[in-house]
């Protein structure tokens, strides 16, 4: 008789209000009043990302690469790690910049980022992933969707582990929760636990 395989939240990262938490422990705290672009620069430097391509990305991709790099650092993951992301604003900020650029000369460097799933590609390149990936647009954080889709990938064998979560950016206001889900860990991968992690520093 088959026993259902259990999955766990192996690692989690939260980015909001000038702070970055790894498994609810503060690893970076900057002045929440500094502007968003400066936050991205300071976080890159202080957390020693050492990935020059970061500086050429749009802000949503920078958030994704920043969060995933910290999340996966020192973790055992394979190229079959899937990405299951969501947000409410799609690629809003870069869309606005693209619209403004259309008033003069359209910038290919801006246009290339006018889809939210580009962040999945940048993360895949950075971490050499060759995996399933999907980006959902939801009105609000939807733990049920993230858990259901991630579990489908894990149970089907299409993914050895999953990075799932919420990566919202609108008008330079950012709200990120990413979790590494695998067979290893102590926190059960459930809607309740995912919502608890999202509510952390989000009250």
Image (spheres, helix red, strand yellow):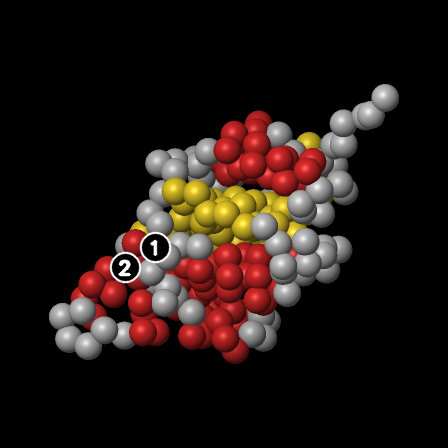
Query: How far from the left and from the top, in percent, is residue 146?
Result: 53, 37
Farthest residue in the left direction?
Answer: 103
The residue positioned 67% from the left and 45% from the top of the image is 158
Question: CB of mark 2 within 8 Å of CB of mark 1?
Answer: yes
Q: Is residue 31 left or right of residue 148?
A: left
Query: How far from the left and from the top, in percent, is residue 71?
Result: 62, 55
Image position of 41 with respect to 139: above or below: below
Q: Which residue is mark 1?
A: 91
Figure quadrant of residue 102: bottom left
Query: How far from the left and from the top, in percent, is residue 69?
Result: 60, 61
Query: How far from the left and from the top, in percent, is residue 180?
Result: 64, 47
Front-lying residue, 53 or 38? 53
Task: Determine whether the residue tagged by mark 2 lies in a helix, strand or loop.
Answer: helix
The residue positioned 46% from the left and 33% from the top of the image is 142
Q: Is residue 44 left or right of residue 109?
A: right
Image position of 8 with respect to 127: above or below: above
Residue 75 visible to the viewer: no
Residue 135 visible to the viewer: yes
Give the position of the C terminus as an image quadrant: top left
Farthest residue in the right direction?
Answer: 1
Marks 2/1: CA–CA distance? 6 Å
Figure quadrant of residue 155: top right
Give the position of the N terminus as an image quadrant: top right
Q: Which residue is mark 2?
A: 95
Front-lying residue, 79 or 68? 79
The residue positioned 69% from the left and 32% from the top of the image is 188
The residue positioned 50% from the left and 33% from the top of the image is 145
């Amino acid at each position: 008789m088959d026993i259902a395989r259990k999955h766990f939240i192996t690692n989690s990262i939260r980015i909001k209000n000038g702070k970055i938490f790894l498994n609810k422990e503060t690893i970076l705290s900057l002045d929440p009043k500094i502007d968003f672009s400066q936050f991205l620069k300071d976080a890159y430097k202080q957390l020693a990302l050492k990935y020059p391509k970061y500086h050429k990305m749009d802000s949503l991709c920078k958030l994704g690469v920043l969060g995933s790099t910290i999340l996966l650092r020192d973790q055992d993951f394979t190229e079959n790690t899937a990405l299951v992301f969501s947000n409410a604003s799609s690629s809003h900020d870069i869309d606005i910049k693209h619209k403004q650029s259309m008033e003069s000369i359209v910038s290919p460097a801006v246009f290339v980022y006018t889809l939210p799933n580009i962040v999945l590609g940048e993360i895949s390149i950075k971490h050499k992933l060759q995996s399933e990936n999907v980006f959902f647009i939801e009105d609000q954080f939807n733990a049920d969707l993230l858990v259901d889709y991630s579990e489908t990938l894990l149970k089907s064998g299409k993914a050895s582990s999953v990075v799932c979560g919420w990566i919202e950016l609108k008008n330079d206001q950012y709200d990120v929760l990413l979790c590494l889900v695998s067979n290893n860990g102590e926190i059960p991968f459930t809607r309740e636990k995912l919502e608890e992690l999202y509510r952390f520093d989000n009250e």
